[in-house]
Amino acid sequence: MAASGTLGGTSCPPTLANPSSWHMPPSPLQLLLERATAIEEDLAQGEDKPFTEVTHCHSGDAVATGHQPLAFLQQVAAICAYPQLLDDECVPADAKRRAGQILQHLQGGSPGAYNLEYVTSTVATKVARYLEQRDGGIPSDPRCIVPCSGTAAAVVDVVSLVVDEAAAQPTGVLVPVPGPPRRGAAVGLAGAVAVPYPLAEERGWAVATEALRRALRRARARCHPKVLCVVNPGDPTGHVLSRQNMEEIIRLAAEENLLLLADEVQQERAFLPGRPFLSFKRVLWEMGAPLASTVQLISFYSLSKGVGGGGYRAGFFELVNIDPSVLRCFYTWGLSVYPPILGQVMLQTAMDPPLPTEPSYPEFEEHRQALRQDLAHNAQRVQEVLGRAPSIHLQPLHGGARAFPRIQLPPRALCQARAQGLEPDVFFCQKLLEATGLVVAPGSEFGQEGGTHHVGLSLLPPAEVLERGLLTLTRFHAAFLREFS
């Protein structure tokens, strides 16, 4: 089925063997957020606390922190949902033209139909043209693009195609630590085994190939590793991989015959000019033969991590060096296809933005640049403020929506956390919330190397909110060290 034999191995839809195991206990962050909600209710009822409000500095959701989706995307989607708006003088003419063109491709002229042909043909073609422009002219085949309703479920679908339930060993998927929490969960839902590999913190969260090889050697005793997942830009680490590091990863994938899954959903949040985002497809192509034509790659894009919003559930993935017949699996089983059509309308519009000659262009471009500038400004302030804290260490930030500072915790605090059955960083975050009302994510939410402790800090809040959060965090950490020293 696949070009090098990596992708394939099943002839029927995947199944989940043990439905009783689907229930997952709430994560430490979920418990913190529940407690934060209870505190907000107490404050609303007049309860006296050392603070007057709860400050949320944990979220990777841009819209939840005040960054609205692009108006042009919303206008086009609104017209498609309610075509009578074509007569509304408040809607820009170019948004009307774009929506009118899209409505011609929708069955019945409505997003209410399943519109499979629209998704797999019209949207896929727009995505392909966008990718060609992004990657400097490298060809992109619409037949190798699968629009989907967000990447979390799509990863499950893709990994399930690699799983061979009849094999003597389960399929292994290498996932980065720290990394997005849902990646490991998606691997499990697909019937595979997550194989964590540590990112090299002291090297700016680079992917160390020697660590990958160690993880592979250890994993082969319990599974058959077939897939390597790389997250670039990093979440929650805020790094953007260098070209050299990406080339090392590609060579290792070729040597070990691994399918390379490139989680590139944060690509539009690369904000440091000196470390621009490069797609794995582009680097692979520019490495030339034989790698460019043999290494199997699937890359993921999410509208919610760019100019859209997470609630619209839209994204896509592209297959490189994989037999197009694999796409039939998605259409035959219904995997990843039939996504919400209004989300796909917004995705198509983001892939085909207003031209410089159109009236919506200035606002569109200003909005896109503003989010990147806000992230860059907040990242700089995080590095400046935390850089002055002697017991907090932060690697340089290049992109993404979070920072992942390493915090020193005294031995007495570690002992007390263990006595309460808590991870030390969870213990710290609980104390921080109760004393100051500040919510940050425990490092264990994303995974971290043993013996290290981190917090996940969002770069998305308004500058004044983040500034207040940084001051609170550094003051509390200093007091925490004194209390438990």
Image (spheres, helix red, strand yellow):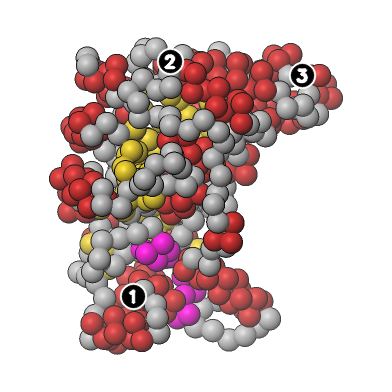
Question: In the image, is residue 423 above or below residue 396?
Answer: below
At x 35% / y 47%, what residue is drawn? 169
| Mark found first going from the N terminus, 2 or 1 | 2
Looking at the rendered structure, the kind of residue marked 3 is Gln
Is residue 24 visible from the viewing direction of this image? yes
Q: In this image, 436 relative to 135: left or right? A: right
- Residue 459's label in the rendered image is none
Q: In this image, 271 relative to 190: left or right? A: left
Is residue 382 visible from the viewing direction of this image? no
Residue that carries the numbered disc 3 in the rendered image: 107
Looking at the rendered structure, the kind of residue marked 2 is Ser
Give the spatial CA distance, label 1 vs label 3: 55 Å
Give the spatial CA distance, label 2 vs label 1: 47 Å
**Rendered location of residue 273, percent (x, y):** 29, 34
At x 49% / y 18%, what residue is drawn? 325
Looking at the rendered structure, the kind of residue marked 1 is Pro
- Quadrant of the image occupied by residue 9: top left
Residue that carries the numbered disc 2 in the rendered image: 140
Q: Toward the viewer: 448 or 376?
A: 448
Residue that carries the numbered disc 1 in the rendered image: 424
Q: Which residues are magenta?
A: 433-445
**Rendered location of residue 482, percent (x, y):** 26, 85
**Rendered location of residue 176, percent (x, y):** 32, 49
